[in-house]
Image: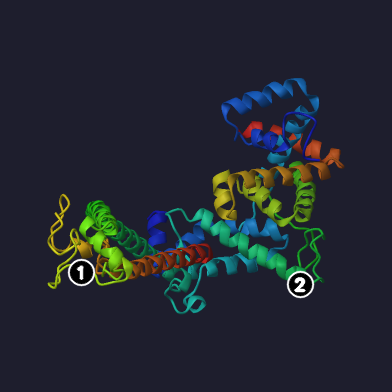
Amino acid sequence: MFWRRHAVHDDDLSAYVDGRLDAAARGRIEAHIESCSSCRQTVAELGELRSALRELPRATAPRSFALREADVRPATPEPAGPFVRAVPMLGGLTAVAVLAFFVLLGFDATVDLDEANDTSGGAARLAGQEESAPAAVNSIQDDATRDAEPPDDANAGAEAEPDSGNFLNGGEAYSTNDDTPQPLPGALTSGDEEPADGEVAGDAATDELQPATPTTDDRDGWPAIRVAEAAAAGVALAAGASLAFVWRRRRT
Amino acid sequence: MDEAELLERSRNGDLDAFNAIVAAYQDRVYNLCLRMLGSPQAAEDATQEAFLSAFRNVARVRGANPKPWLFRIASNACIDELRRRKRQPQLSLDAPARDDEDDRPLDVPDTEAGPERRALQGELADALQAELLRLPEDQRLAVILCDVEQLQYEEIAASMRCSVGTVKSRISRGRARLRDALRTRPELFGDVVRHTRGTSEQHR
């Protein structure tokens, strides 16, 4: 009924009669109706109908519709309803929540950057310590190797004395060659090892196996910030959704 | 005092300022209600209700032009009345426009027309009014606002709270229905239109 087997829609013909088409569309319609008698007839009828409706007698009000005080008491117009009053409040709440979210996000990102810097410095220290640790372990292994091969003089006594006291055989760690307890040659003692580059002697034995970790002080604020971010985002979403609902419901 | 100032004073509770707006628009609002409802009594009630509602809600009006807002309120009052009628089936929407009191066709005299034109216009007016009442409410309102009240598409869109495209479609569909209905009475439609064209050309 409304679609024709043409490239022209009835809505366009109606708008053409009202003078609502742009120049290009108007040219298209006029070119079409020159060759299409059906559309030409439709345009003529629409024009006639439009004129007939415009020519309908216009009624005048049978009486005055002016309002009286008694009709509108209280005299002052009704205040805006709750939906209208809620609009600025919800709008402000949404704006504040969004701003708070981005401020917290920026602060969180700043803390992450600081942590990254601290972590990279600690990684450098950790790398240095790890280099010294293999060196220390190697020295221990060398010592163990040396210890596994006791000196010749010790070997001569080992055959006659199976319990030579060599620590690798389960004996005491000190040589039993003399009465004075002496550490075995090459045994690791405090201060004997030369410190690795960049490393301070004295604490290498303990530091090498304990990589530096970030202090826990910086971690304390993270959960609080994330919770605050989530709360701000939640408030912004809820306030924004409420604002959209109230905006559609407000009366004008 | 211009309409913008009257509107502003009305927002502040000035009843006299609002009644000045009523005086300026009551004919148009009543005419809209009459064409929508087809009954003078119903149109009078709807017009009164429309202006009461307008004053109660004037604080919410945006802008300085009261016309789209008043037509929207009047349209809503008419829609409310039509829905009330649907709930009361003793009033048929398909019946020709009748005066409730003396059961005569809707009589809106055109004091400027000659006798012959008045007769033809009377018949065509009745036919057009009857066919308007058969249109769906949204198409009826769009056609009346466009062709009877001669509002622009944008004003109609503001009054009906829809897009311009929707207005264009509703006007087109309403006109198509009217045209199809009047095609069955070519003697009435064609004769009056030829006469209308001639009269219009004389007035120019």
Looking at the picture, do discs 2 and 1 lie on one chain?
no
Q: Quadrant of residue A224?
A: bottom left
CB within 8 Å, label 2 to label 1: no
State the image coordinates of residue B39 (x, y, percent, origin top left): 72, 63
Q: Quadrant of residue A28?
A: top right
Q: Residue at x 40, y 60 (%)?
A: B6
Considering the numbered disc 2 on the image, is that residue within a helix, a strand or a loop? helix
Closest to the observer: B40 or A45? A45
Q: Is residue A77 left or right of residue A31?
A: left
State the image coordinates of residue B20 (x, y, percent, origin top left): 45, 61
The circle drawn on residue B98 is none
Q: Quadrant of residue A37?
A: top right
**For mark 1, what is the residue?**
A174
Counting every numbered tag in the picture gives 2
**For mark 2, what is the residue?**
B87
State the image coordinates of residue B55 (x, y, percent, origin top left): 49, 68
Disc 1 packing (10 Å; few <14; some 14–19; many ≥20): some
Closest to the observer: A252 or B110? A252
- Amino acid type indicated by mark 1: Tyr
Q: Residue at x 28, y 64 (%)?
A: A158
